Amino acid sequence: MDRRQLLKILAAMPAASLAGPAFAQDAAWPTRAMTMIVPFPPGGQADLAARPMANAMTNILGRPVVVENRGGAGGAIGNAAAAKAPPDGYTMLMTLSSLAVLPESQKLFGQTPSYEMSQLVPVARILADPTVLAVPASAPWRTVQELVEDAKKRPGKIEYGSSGRYGTTHVSMAMFTHAAGIDMLHVPYQGGGPSLTALVQNEVQAIASAPGPLKPFLDKVRVLACFGAKRIDAFPDAPTFQELGYKSVEFYIWAGLFLPVGVPDPVVTKLRTSIREAIQSPDVVRILDHAGSPPAYLDMPEFKAFVAADSERLVAAVRAIGKVE
């Protein structure tokens, strides 16, 4: 057989048969354990989404999906680790809406961003809740107005905790303090879980939080307001900031699954299928409902559009707030 005849035969063969071992590897994926990075310590919204989903996906995919809490820098360390991971599907990222904010905040301080949004691909949204403003049950304020009046009398004296500088719960609180014209002292923690612990132990006097993590501590905290456009069932007596006249204060803390750019399409398809099955499983629905954060699933195309729109809004808010400590 001469070279010309060989080329004709190869040209007529299906593409899959030419893909060789790489195609076979994608078809067999996964062949080992996978890691789901949560860029925060245990106890926060991303961790709440990750653990039941990882368990369900383990059963569906037949290989362990291991949650790895890699906190620090408001989520930037874990986000960057996932963004720079090999694009083979074995490293996933369950992160929050601060994903788009953190690179922008680093630019505000003249730093080179530790990652860029272009390095990550949105795959699925799992949760989407408005944050709420919570204070200790022993705090003297029973309304937002009382807190604002006190903060104006004592600028820089009332401490609020957050998941880290320019993290999800910092940006929402900065939106509020900026709109109210008050100065509160920001105390950053390594994640939403530690900041909630600080509130419960009266180390700080306020936090913004997703509703779910607050549920076990209803006897120790008081919710003053909701950052969403409408009141939420978990705290029906808490007015929205928009009801209170703060029209620019609106913030949602969503949790979603991302992959590094370049993961082969067959692997992405398998992951999307496993996520869709997992989010509908009775155990996952029960756990998330019980936590006060019901599933808010969006598949890849819809989630991509959602992330693009939400990121644009949040980046604009951060630029308006400017440098804050």
Image (spheres, rainbow, N blue to C red):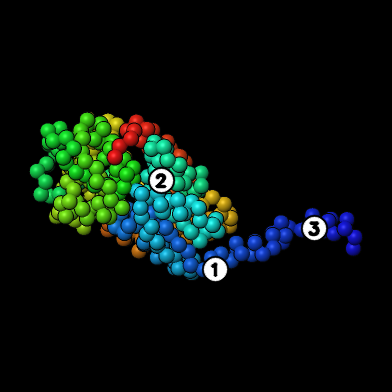
- Image location of residue 47, percent across then percent down: 34, 57
**Residue that protrudes farthest toward the right in the picture:** 2
- Residue identified by numbered label 1: 31
Residue in the picture at 14% in, 55% down: 219
Q: Is residue 297 visible?
A: no
Tell me how far mark 1 sits from mark 2, CA to CA. Answer: 29 Å
- Image location of residue 181, percent across then percent down: 22, 30
Q: Is residue 112 visible?
A: yes
- Residue identified by numbered label 2: 99
Looking at numbered disc 2 in the image, what kind of residue is underneath it?
Answer: Leu
Tell me how far mark 3 sits from mark 2, CA to CA. Answer: 45 Å
Looking at numbered disc 3 in the image, what kind of residue is underneath it?
Answer: Leu
Circles 1 and 2 in contact, beta carbons < 8 Å: no
Query: Which mark is nearer the camera, 3 or 2?
Result: 2
Write down the quadrant of residue 282 in the picture: bottom left
Q: Which mark is residue 198?
A: none
Query: Which mark is nearer the camera, 1 or 2?
Result: 2
